[in-house]
Amino acid sequence: MSAERAAATYRRAFGEDPAVVASAPGRVNLIGEHTDYNGGDVLPMALSLRTSVAVGPSTDALSHAVSEQSPRVGAFSPTGPSRSSAWWDYVAGTMLALGTAGVAPRPLRIAVASDVPSGAGLSSSAALEVATAFALNAWSGGGLDARTLARVAHRAETEFVGVPCGIMDQYVSSLAREGHALLVACDREEATLVPMAATVLIFDTRTPRSLRTSAFAQRRHECEIALRAIQRNEPAVRWLSRASEEQVRRATMDEIVRKRALHVVRETARVAACVRTLRETGRLAGDSMYASHASLRDDYQCSTPELDWFVDRAQETRGVTGARLTGAGWGGCAIAAGAPGPLRQLADSAMEPFATQYRRRPRFWMSAASDGARVDVLRENLVGGATAMTLNP
Ligand code: GLA
């Protein structure tokens, strides 16, 4: 368990027990890609892989951060940290954002342990931000709810770390529940749990994602151009994802930009279809997943040969019902749906041919939909002065 490892890392580094330990999961998105920042719907689920943070008071005026994974130790000002491009920026940014939500920053010590691989597109950064937000909130008396903490974590990512992502990752990491996918209507920031018993296969192509940040920002920009073009005819359309295909076709815009816009509008419709199927049959709509991947490959142009290779192979595997890239794309992971036996067979049989073709060993995990963030241990409430207690042991 990463919670125990975070506490052990804390003890090793700082010589005493932490005051609070909290954890938050990584995620995969089942469907609804590049719709969140266009005000559309997304359907992610939380993974069983989690990031834990152990937190306690600092003995000087600075905050200090250590990680089980990284030899780099951070020290930063709790009230005015500057961006360092190191992993503790996620912690420092979350502290700052919590400050604006009413949780006064104070010097802390923090130790991190994680099972969410970083750089794989499974939202390790959101898991760290959300776990930090939950820990500091509990430590200061626990006044903020999970939705507010998701927004705080999102502000850390966009305003401090500087990644222009939508709200999906922080929302699902905060609000998910075991056995459920989370439908988020991003224009209203409204989250609904949808029962989902299925296990999904996550296949990590382990491809470098160097293009990801710049290409992501470029796509966002193209979507803004498309929305403005639509609004010239239809001023009432506030979000690209809520436009109709007809409105996209009628507007005057570059053909590349139109392809991006059509992806967003159709993908939003696919989320609704997938949610309907899930509610009616308990299964993921495989056809919608394949259609989503084709649209991301051809219209949004954020796939890679490795991701396409995996999805093609899934399509040829008996008993596998759907597959698509998940997350931003430009490398990272794909998912597949179906019965556990065929999924495992797909993963096992893909390893060697993939490694031979792409000279990289892929990784895979099977995960059911898991719980969102929680406070695992609260030793003492330093603000309220409460006595020792344990939550979710
Ligand atoms: C990244 C972002 C998310 C979302 C996806 C694409 O994972 O962090 O907010 O935009 O890309 O769906």
Image: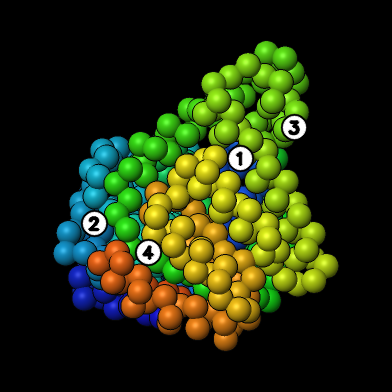
Q: Quadrant of residue 117?
A: bottom left
Distance from disc 2 to disc 3, alpha carbons, whole Å, reads: 50 Å
Q: Dot 3 corresponds to which residue?
A: 244
How many numbered tags mark residues here? 4
Counting residues from the start of the chain, the first of labels 4 and 1 encountered is 4
Distance from disc 2 to disc 4, alpha carbons, whole Å, reads: 34 Å
Q: Dot 2 corresponds to which residue?
A: 64
Q: Dot 1 corresponds to which residue?
A: 263
Counting residues from the start of the chain, the first of labels 2 and 3 encountered is 2
Counting residues from the start of the chain, the first of labels 2 and 1 encountered is 2
Instruction: Kindly identify the amino acid type of the residue bearing the numbered disc 4.
Output: Thr
User: Which residue, as the protein is rendered here, is positioned at the far bottom?
Assistant: 341
Residue 194 % position (x, y): 73, 64
Element class at badge 3: loop
Q: Is residue 38 visible?
A: yes
Instruction: Kindly identify the amino acid type of the residue bearing the numbered disc 2.
Output: His
Residue 231 % position (x, y): 68, 18
Residue 178 vs residue 132, the one in the foreground:
178
Residue at image point 83% right, 67% down: 280
Counting residues from the start of the chain, the first of labels 3 and 4 encountered is 4
